[in-house]
């Protein structure tokens, strides 16, 4: 399994043809206490760079963009009852949705953990 | 007999019934600042403020067995108890009549008492929207006169008076644009919204069925004209732009933006919520705007506490005017003002109208106040209003830029809003903490965390009606709290310390909202 990161502060775990998407620890820290997460429906097609989910904190509501294109195969229903999972475990239990990978080439421009750490450092 | 408080809970207690402060009083009051319990906790179902004869039972009704059988359980209060309850609550409110209200999202400026006097005249206050037109000639005259001045002040061609507030006005403008596009058989799908626009702009476009796309802001906080030009094309219906924008800046390229948008066959919607910074100085019609709402409850000082009532007339360009909503007023050569309610009325044909925004004619009380404000200020007065609003905001910006991060301080003078960010605060201290500290200083906090392009944004709108002395006191308070935030004063994290309530748990309130009162004695 390999993990990629985007400049919009999402992480993507790739396992075979499936990708799991969530927001990074840095992102949850910036957003503050998460109070609501709106997830895409299973079966929905999402396009790279377009809105896929909404995350709402006490400060603001923010769009979460699809890091790659694909079909949503599962969304994390645990976030319906406990959106705080995004704060306590952003990069494990607080994952948002899983999707099929339409085009592996879309992963090429993404960052690895080290590059993302440098990116965050530069902000 | 008034039933005693069943639980013994007092406002100074926490949810577990423990008194919250060491110095808590028996009553929960602080000297003559009275705390107040919920009406359900002080009322009793056996008390009433009115004495009515018992209804004959069983009463005849046509509810078919659905009539209520159980007591409704509403709290009853005597008249003096009722008066005290609401008066005590009103004393806990913070209002523009108590002090400076720097909330940038709404212009919390003084509401001249002359406006109130005029609005309360029975000929305006007591009219009904369904009474015969011949009996409301004065009210129609006010609507028509106000419409004239709104068109005059904005340099536009027509105006829709019925929208109820800013976002409603935005929808009206976008529906005019859609009707104009449909009339030429041009189904465009995209509305562009710059990052410096109000959050309601993309919401309006989405609500009207358009796809919304962002246009980035430049580092100085204005629309990126080149990025906008690059995105314009045959699929773009409109650009929604806020000017002055949410970074507190005037969009200097507005004319160039409008020209480019028109060249691409699209329309320009301008969010006029910030018109109070430029009224009497700039006419949006000269900048190529096709539609703009005017918040009477902001620019023209009609009171807007607690979310209403608003009024958002929409001025329209010549290209959009034929598509504006019904009803509207129009004066004939004989001087009589008519109310046009239908599309086909002979002299006032308006057959291309997209329809209605409201059942009736708009907010009469706001119309009366706004016209009073415009006429009592006059041309020179309105110009001074916007000059003073801008001067006051710049005074705050320049007085605090040495202590608070001011991201657009180098972009030239701000308009009527000064923007600061949280850069430089000690680790662990945030804009929220500063805002809570400001409550302890006796001020309503400014707008926080908006616009999104500024980290930890604080948007301060002082308005034109504050004196230099009032501004100096506010600046002193904000400086003091900002210095504490920079120095890492931990006590800010638990502010407010002196308010009727301490720091509220906003997270819990949002995650597990309790929206209905339940009687703790019934558990």
Image: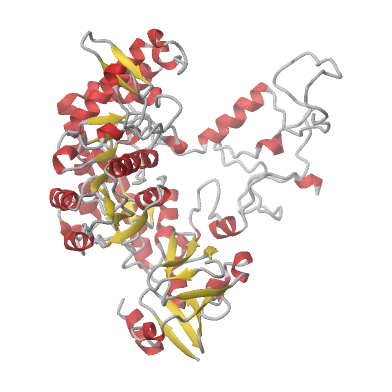
Residue B281 locus on image (x, y percent): 14, 37
Quarter holding the C terminus of chain A is bottom left
Locate residue B371 relative to residue A10 in the image: left or right.
left
Q: Give the answer, above or below, for where B344 lies relative to B315.
A: above
The extreme front residue here reads: B185
Residue B307 locus on image (x, y percent): 45, 38
Residue B193 locus on image (x, y percent): 30, 55
Locate residue B442 relative to residue B193 in the image: left or right.
right
The image quadrant of residue B60 is top right
Residue at the image position 78 percent from the left and 22 percent from the top: B62
Q: Give the answer, above or below, for where B468 lies relative to B119.
A: below
The image quadrant of residue B222 is bottom left
Residue at the image position 84 percent from the left and 15 percent from the top: B56
Q: Nearer the viewer, residue B394 or B443?
A: B394
Residue at the image position 58 percent from the left and 78 percent from the top: A93
Q: Give the answer, above or below, for where B479 lies relative to B121.
A: below
The extreme right residue here reads: B58
Q: Nearer the viewer, residue B43 or B331?
A: B331
Regarding residue B468, the answer to whether it shows in the image is no
């Amino acid at each position: 399994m390999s993990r990629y990161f985007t400049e919009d502060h999402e992480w993507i775990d790739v396992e075979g043809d499936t990708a799991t998407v969530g927001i990074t620890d840095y992102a949850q820290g910036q957003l503050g206490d998460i109070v609501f997460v709106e997830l895409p429906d299973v079966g929905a097609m999402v396009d790279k760079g377009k809105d896929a989910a909404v995350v709402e904190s006490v400060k603001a509501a923010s769009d979460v963009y699809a890091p790659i294109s694909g079909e949503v195969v599962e969304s994390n229903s645990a976030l319906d009852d406990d959106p705080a999972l995004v704060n306590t475990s952003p990069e494990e239990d607080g994952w948002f949705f899983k999707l099929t990978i339409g085009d592996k080439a879309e992963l090429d421009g993404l960052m690895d953990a080290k590059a993302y750490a440098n990116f965050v450092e530069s902000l | 007999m008034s039933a005693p408080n069943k639980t013994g809970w007092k406002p100074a207690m926490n949810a577990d019934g423990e008194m919250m402060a060491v110095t808590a009083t028996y009553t929960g009051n602080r000297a003559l600042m009275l705390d107040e319990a919920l009406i359900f906790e002080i009322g009793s179902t056996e008390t009433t403020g009115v004495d009515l004869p018992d209804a004959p039972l069983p009463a005849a009704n046509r509810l078919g067995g659905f009539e209520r059988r159980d007591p409704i359980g509403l709290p009853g209060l005597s008249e003096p108890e009722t008066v005290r309850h609401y008066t005590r609550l009103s004393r806990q409110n913070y209002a523009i009549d108590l002090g400076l209200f720097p909330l940038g999202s709404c212009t919390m400026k003084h509401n001249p008492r002359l406006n109130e006097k005029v609005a309360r005249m029975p000929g305006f206050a007591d009219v009904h929207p369904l009474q015969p037109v011949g009996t409301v000639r004065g009210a129609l005259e006010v609507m028509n006169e106000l419409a004239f001045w709104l068109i005059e002040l904005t340099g536009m061609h027509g105006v829709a008076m019925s929208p109820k507030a800013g976002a409603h006005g935005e929808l009206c403008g976008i529906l005019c644009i859609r009707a104009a596009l449909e009339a030429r058989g041009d189904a465009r799908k995209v509305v562009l919204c710059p990052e410096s626009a109000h959050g309601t702009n993309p919401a309006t476009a989405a609500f009207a069925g358009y796809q919304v796309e962002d246009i980035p802001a430049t580092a100085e906080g204005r629309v990126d004209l080149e990025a906008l030009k690059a995105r314009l094309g045959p699929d773009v219906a409109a650009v929604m732009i806020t000017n002055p924008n949410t970074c507190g800046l005037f969009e200097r390229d507005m004319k160039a933006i409008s020209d480019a948008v028109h060249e691409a066959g699209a329309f320009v919607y301008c969010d006029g919520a910030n018109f109070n910074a430029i009224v009497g100085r700039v006419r949006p019609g000269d900048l190529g705007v096709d539609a703009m709402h005017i918040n009477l409850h902001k620019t023209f000082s009609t009171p807007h506490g607690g979310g209403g009532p608003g009024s958002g007339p929409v001025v329209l360009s010549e290209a959009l005017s034929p598509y504006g909503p019904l009803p509207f007023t129009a004066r004939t050569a004989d001087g009589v003002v008519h109310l046009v309610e239908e599309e086909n009325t002979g002299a006032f044909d308006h057959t291309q109208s997209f329809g209605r925004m409201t059942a009736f004619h708009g907010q009469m009380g706001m119309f009366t106040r706004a016209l009073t404000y415009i006429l009592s200020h006059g041309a020179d007065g309105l110009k001074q209003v916007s000059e003073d609003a801008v001067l006051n905001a710049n005074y705050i910006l320049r007085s605090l830029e040495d202590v608070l991060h001011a991201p657009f301080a180098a972009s030239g003078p701000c308009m009527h809003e000064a923007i600061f960010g949280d850069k430089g605060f000690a680790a662990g201290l945030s804009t929220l903490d500063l805002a809570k500290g400001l409550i302890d200083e006796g001020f309503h906090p400014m707008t926080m965390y908006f616009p999104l392009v500024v980290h930890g944004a604080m948007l301060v709108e002082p308005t034109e009606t504050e004196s230099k002395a009032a501004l100096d006191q506010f600046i002193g308070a904000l400086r003091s709290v900002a210095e504490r935030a920079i120095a890492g004063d931990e006590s800010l994290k638990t502010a407010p310390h002196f308010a009727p309530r301490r720091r509220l748990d906003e997270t819990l309130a949002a995650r597990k909202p309790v929206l209905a009162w339940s009687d703790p004695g019934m558990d």
